[in-house]
Image (tube, rainbow, N blue to C red):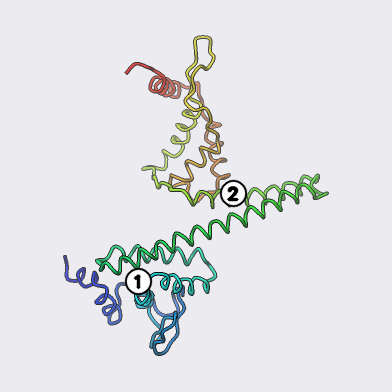
Amino acid sequence: MLLKQRLFSNMILRNMISDWVGLSGNNKAPGTFPIFFQYKIGPYKPDYFLYFQKEPFSVRYKNDIFNKLYEYSGSDISDYINFHYNHYQDKQAFLKFLRYEVHDRLNIKLTGIWKQKLQFVLYWLQEKEQELTAMQHSQLQHEIEQGMRAIANDPEVVNPGKADELVNDLSEKLNLLVEKLSEGYATGNIRVAEQKHLHSLIQLLYILQNLQKNSRNGKANQRLFSTFSAIDMAAILRLHFADWKEKQQNTIQKDIAAVTKDINVDSEKFKRLDKALQDFFFDQNP
């Protein structure tokens, strides 16, 4: 291991080096980075604030968050983090920052006590993320219920323009709810090697969606899926493929519709693929 790696793997030396020369080129100047944990300029006091003799650079600031945390144990760690979490307005950003910083430090050579304290922070993060998600779900559901009542009770809803406005607003809230619900599930990060294959991927899913084996009289007697809707396809793409993760669910559904409407199922290319898939799934021979 290089000398620099050994020095930076030791938490005490890491902090000392960050004070003298800065830990990396990403050591941001005072006032140029977000303040998730509150601090004061002045002598140290035994409370939850961080204390510095002068305005800190970002590396020293982040290190002192965890130096302060090391002073506590058990529920005191929770009280310390809650103090700062409750003072920061953007809860999602606070949780994201803390999770990234904890994982970064868990990759450094640490003592058993340090690891225990960081594991406790991960438990705290899991609890708070669940609480925040539940609160966001409740708020969105309340807004959706209000939107439904507005559509039902608004005398102007017969006006096509007014109806479209209400429906679009409600659709946006439903999409947000779906996004928040999906955040609670493990997702993939599949990347297609070439962009030209994105259309082909949708076409393949479309063929699988409709794959069936017909009897001699032309009636379907076997299907691959009993249910597989366009919404299901959009969810698969959004949750597991990097190229669609930033898109809204309804936008992906429109992409799917745009691709599938141009599929010529009577072309030799698609006939061969459909036949090969039928043989693969429905042929009983090994």
Picture coordinates of residue 103 (x, y %)?
A: 35, 62
Q: What type is the residue that disc 2 sits on?
A: Asn
Q: Which residue is mark 2?
A: 175
| Visible residue check, residue 62 | no
Q: Earlier in the sequence, mark 1 or mark 2?
A: 1
Instruction: Identify whether 62 is placed above or below 215.
Output: below
Q: Neighbour class for label 1 at 10 Å: few (<14), some, many (≥20)?
A: few
Q: Which mark is residue 26?
A: 1
Q: What type is the residue that disc 1 sits on?
A: Asn
> In percent of the image, x 55 and y 56: which residue is there?
134
Picture coordinates of residue 258 (x, y %)?
A: 55, 37
25 or 116, which is in the foreground?
116
Q: Is residue 149 left or right of residue 204?
A: right
> In percent of the image, x 43 and y 48: which residue is there?
186
Q: Quadrant of residue 160?
A: top right
**How many numbered marks appear?**
2
Mark 1, mark 2: which one is toward the viewer? 2
Q: Neighbour class for label 2 at 10 Å: few (<14), some, many (≥20)?
A: some
Q: Is residue 279 left or right of residue 183?
A: left
| Visible residue check, residue 171 | yes
Task: Locate the C terminus and report the quarter of the image it occupies.
Answer: top left
19 or 86, which is in the foreground?
86
